[in-house]
């Protein structure tokens, strides 16, 4: 695997971690949250110029499969995944443009509200994420 493809895969795997953290922060990950993520990735992430055409399938699979693996594994919690994402973000600041950050917040918010209204734990994590992205 070449460096460009590995970098793209790593970026999207870390997005999968973050989106899992948003879904799992309230203690359970619902089918509706994964379905919402699938729709957003397909309709919004892959329709942007953030991902080159030849890597769109890999990017989509990296986000969704990472989310599903974390959900199914039950060894990782929301805080671990969120903190892992923050470390990645701080080490790869150049990838987190204003447009990417806006889409991250939009995606995270839609996941949080996909089952019912946003609960307190989701709201708090989204607020923390918004601050981190703005300060990055």
Image (spheres, helix red, strand yellow):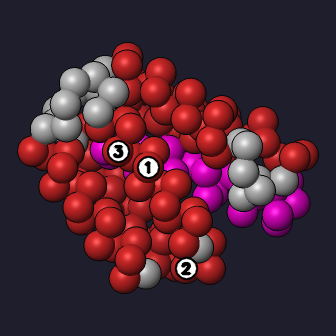
Q: Which mark identifies residue 93? A: 2
Residue at 72% from the left image edge and 58% from the top image edge: 50
Say which element carries label 3. Answer: helix
Q: What residue sits right under mark 1 in the picture?
A: 106
Q: Which residues are magenta?
A: 1-23
Upstream in sequence: badge 2 or badge 1:
2
Note whether residue 92 is visible. no
Image position of 8 with respect to 53: above or below:
below
- Residue 97's spot in the image, x, y percent? 58, 73
Q: Say which quarter of the image contains residue 92.
A: bottom right
User: Pointer 3: residues within 10 angstroms few (<14), some, or many (20+)?
Assistant: some
Residue 120 is marked as none
Relative height, residue 110 to residue 135 (above, below): above
Does label 3 or label 2 sit earlier along the sequence? 2
In the image, farthest residue toward the top: 31
Q: Report the magenta stretch's main SS.
A: helix
Give the residue at x 33% y 73%. Answer: 132
Q: Is residue 88 visible?
A: yes
Q: Quadrant of the C terminus?
A: bottom left
Q: Viewed as shown, does residue 16 lie left or right of 42?
A: left
Q: CA distance from mark 2 to mark 1?
A: 19 Å
Q: CA distance from mark 3 to mark 2?
A: 22 Å
- Report helix, strand or loop for mark 1: helix
């Amino acid at each position: 695997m070449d460096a460009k493809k590995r970098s793209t895969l790593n970026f999207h795997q870390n997005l999968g971690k973050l989106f899992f953290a948003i879904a799992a922060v309230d203690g359970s990950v619902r089918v509706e949250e994964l379905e919402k993520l699938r729709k957003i990735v397909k309709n919004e992430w892959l329709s942007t110029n953030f991902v080159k055409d030849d890597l769109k399938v890999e990017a989509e699979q990296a986000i969704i499969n990472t989310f599903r693996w974390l959900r199914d594994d039950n060894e990782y919690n929301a805080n671990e995944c969120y903190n892992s994402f923050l470390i990645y973000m701080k080490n790869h600041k150049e990838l987190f443009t204003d447009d990417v950050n806006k889409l991250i917040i939009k995606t995270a918010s839609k996941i949080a509200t996909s089952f019912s209204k946003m609960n307190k734990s989701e709201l708090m994590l989204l607020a923390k994420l918004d601050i981190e992205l703005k300060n990055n």
